[in-house]
Amino acid sequence: MSELLKTPLHDLHVEMGAKMVPFAGYNMPVQYPAGVMKEHLHTRDQAGLFDVSHMGQVVLRGERAAAALEQLVPVDIIDLPVGKQRYAFFTNEQGGVLDDLMVANYGDFIYVVVNAACKEQDIAYMRASLGSDVELEVLDDRALIALQGPVAAQVLARLQPELKSMLFMDVREVEIEGMSCLVSRSGYTGEDGYEISLPGDQAERFCRLLLQQPEVALIGLGARDSLRLESGLCLYGHDITTETTPVEASLLWAISKVRRADGERAGGFPGADRIFEQMRNASELRQKRVGLIATGKAPVREGAELVNIEGIKIGEVTSGSFGPSIGNPVAMGYLAREYAALDTEVYALVRGKALPMKVASMPFVKQRYYRGEG
């Protein structure tokens, strides 16, 4: 076993009493003394501070950077406006998802954030695929911090007032207390908030400034997972994999119009033919990602089989937890298409018992991204 990597905030986590666990090759905080439930509710009510420095941060430069990256994803990168960010995913030749990622246009460069567990393969894939005229720089000397919650904007505006005017998926390069930051108004909790990339050697000072604000508390991986699940957001390697296509994963909204079969720049990405075929024949899909709400109080975890009234397997749970904001167990998973309609009753097998669940729309809690007043 190789030694676990540490983020620039490792010492701060330990000082604050974090329970540290291995995650994607890093030693990461799963929770702090307050516990997952309180951390989750604090983020929904005030502002949670997350260390996501284990994620991969990459900068692409060159006139062809956007066009080259667009060939790897079913998303419009060429026309992504300066100052905007977009959700994307790499697909393979079978239409499966290799990883999901965020792509931002900063004008002079394209900034990409990839998942921690996939970052080595993603970086190698981009190096091999983008071409020699695209310069790829891995930002391994930078931290990535997320501030999430309904008062995140109010808190961050105390340090840098211009950030308050940003809208959901805006990006901006700014100085905060003398630190050079790449800021996006986005996150992984369903709440309003920001993700901030800054030099690793300044990350602890930045976080201590935020923690001086009375509304801010450190939040670990445990609450990060329950927050994103309540908000219906996929976790790569669980809810989306190389075995699931964007159509099966209910991610059609993320396939840009210009890249669809009837679009101006149709196809040209790996697996386009299979994805377009599934889009044309949705009624013939083998499976579909759905939300599930338990009618009882027992949590249903990842890996639980889903069966019909006759006990025949019809799917599997890919993420499951107690939802602190709604006071009920929630899950997402894949069901055979004929069972995927809203309010269909299915059963999760947990310790030999068949627990009833209903197919429900996601997100389970309303997303509160900031898109402007009114």
Image (spheres, rainbow, N blue to C red):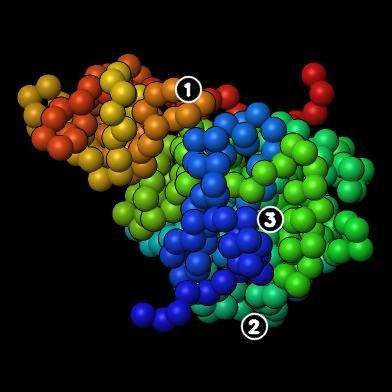
Measure the C-alpha gap from mark 2 to mark 1: 50 Å
Expressed as whole percent of the image width and height from the top left, the position of residue 13 reads 61, 60
Measure the C-alpha gap from mark 3 to mark 1: 27 Å
Could you tell which of marks 2 and 1 lies nearer the N-terminus? 2
User: At 30% across and 44% down in the image, what residue appears?
Assistant: 302
In this picture, is 273 found above or below 108?
above
**Quick check: 312 left or right of 70?**
left
Amino acid residing under circle 3:
Ile
Q: Are marks 2 and 1 in contact (CB under 8 Å)?
A: no
Quadrant of image for the C terminus? top right
User: At 58% across and 62% down in the image, what residue appears?
Assistant: 14
Measure the C-alpha gap from mark 2 to mark 3: 31 Å
Could you tell which of marks 3 and 1 lies nearer the N-terminus? 3
Expressed as whole percent of the image width and height from the top left, the position of residue 268 reads 52, 59
Q: Which mark is residue 326?
A: 1
User: At 36% across and 34% down in the image, what residue appears?
Assistant: 331
Report helix, strand or loop for mark 1: loop
Assess disc 2: are there few (<14), some (14-19) or many (≥20) residues with their C-alpha within 10 Å of its C-alpha. few
In this picture, is 23 found above or below 312?
below
Q: Is residue 309 visible?
A: yes
Q: Which residue is mark 2?
A: 132
Q: Which mark is residue 12?
A: none
